[in-house]
Image (tube, rainbow, N blue to C red):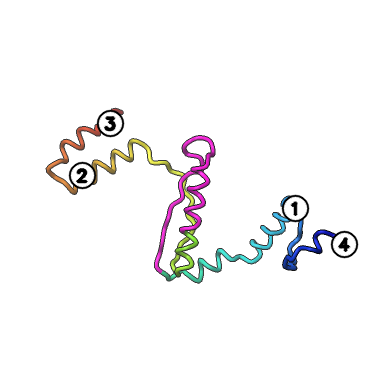
Amino acid sequence: MEYKDTLNLPRTDFAMKADLVTREPERLKKWEEANLYWKIQTARATAKKFVLHDGPPFANGDVHIGTALNKILKDIIIKYQTLRGKSAPYIPGWEVLNTFSAAHCFCHFFSTSLKLYSIKVVSCFRLNN
């Protein structure tokens, strides 16, 4: 008698071997043929929008655990909002907020919102070009 026959395990159609190299292309082809992403986006076209821009890949150097956590959390949030009935498309980003645009936004916000402080804020963010 084989040891595996003595275990009380469920019978499934899953293969015992992962075999990622051959199975991944098959799985990706099946997903592309199903066109599920576009079907979901079409069905949710008139629903309330939820937009979460994904930043550039590896903006802060090499890949690390924080990079993975960031991508996973964003994926979970988008899927959650989609399941709640919202139109939540995946929007990849590339632009990294640089010093000039950060200073410009900061100065614009304070100069329009807080007139008393606009001179101090603008002067402290003066850019030399």
Task: Tell me how far mark 3 sits from mark 2, CA to CA.
Answer: 16 Å
Residue 29: percent from the left, percent from the top?
68, 59
Magenta extent: 48-77
Residue 63: percent from the left, percent from the top?
54, 39
* Mark closer to the chain start, 2 or 1: 1
Vertical position of residue 70 compared to residue 38: above or below: above
The residue sitting at 53% across, 35% down in the picture is 62
The residue sitting at 53% across, 46% down in the picture is 68
Question: Circle 3 sits in a helix, a strand or a loop, which is it?
Answer: loop
* Mark closer to the chain start, 2 or 4: 4
Residue sitting farthest toward the left: 116
Task: Tell me how far mark 2 sits from mark 1, CA to CA.
Answer: 57 Å
Q: On the image, numbered disc 4 is attached to which residue?
A: 1
* Mark closer to the chain start, 3 or 2: 2
Question: Circle 2 sits in a helix, a strand or a loop, which is it?
Answer: helix
Task: Tell me how far mark 4 sits from mark 1, CA to CA.
Answer: 28 Å
Q: In the rendered structure, find residue 19 and report the number of the disc placed on it.
A: 1
Task: Tell me how far mark 3 sits from mark 4, CA to CA.
Answer: 80 Å
